[in-house]
Amino acid sequence: MERSEITKATVAAIIAPDKSSRSTVILTCRSVLPFKGFWCLPGGHIDAAETARAAVVREVAEETGLEFIDPQFLAYSDEIFPEYGFHAVALCFYGTGQGTLKLMPEEVEQISWFPLHEALKLPLAFNHLQMLQLYAQHPQ
């Protein structure tokens, strides 16, 4: 990675089906590099002149077909992967999803609800395991 490359700002969403079902979350399986074929939280890059909250709502809709309700900030993560030439600061939000889950094949090859304890055992892309671990410990 060249030193002159600008660090990207990204968002990630931890989505539960409702406020009483925090132990179930959505993961998507990436169809693009980096981490093609890995499970991850829905999310992506923040566009120019877009707030992080607007970006996470947009990304959830684009990748899952769901409306992300009342996203709450959880934490940030420095995602530095020199082997992929990737450096981003990821802002993680949690909330609930409404609507019908829909596969969006441009970026995602699979999408599924997982019990949180199973999601924590999967090989996840980026630093999404650490984000899920924080979520699991976070009082609601």
Image: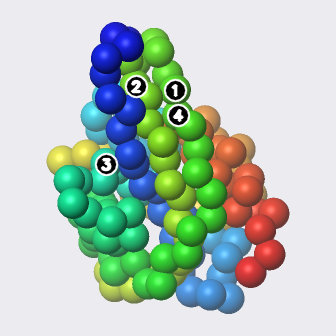
Element type at mark 2: strand
Disc on res. 80: 1
Horizontally, is 70 left or right of 124 in the view? left
Identify residue for label 2.
Answer: 86
* Type of amino acid under label 1: Ile
The x and y percentages for residue 29 are 41, 45
76 and 126: which is toward the camera: 76
Q: Do the residues bearing badges 1 and 4 touch, measured as CB atoms within 8 Å?
A: yes
Q: Position of residue 11 (x, y in %)?
A: 42, 55
Secondary element type, mark 1: strand
Res 124 seen here? yes
Q: Is residue 15 rendered to the left or right of residue 46?
A: right
- State if disc 2 and disc 4 touch (CB < 8 Å): yes
The residue that label 4 is drawn on is 79
**Badge 2: residue crowd in 10 Å (few <14, some 14–19, many ≥20):** some
Q: Amino acid at mark 2?
A: Phe
> How many angstroms separate mark 4 from mark 2 (CA)?
8 Å
- The N terminus lies in quadrant: top left
Q: Amino acid at mark 4?
A: Glu
Q: Name the colour scheme.
A: rainbow
Q: Position of residue 44 (x, y in %)?
A: 34, 50
Mark toward the start of the polypeptide (1 vs 3): 3
Indicate the secondary structure of the residue bearing disc 3: strand
Tag 3 residue: 45
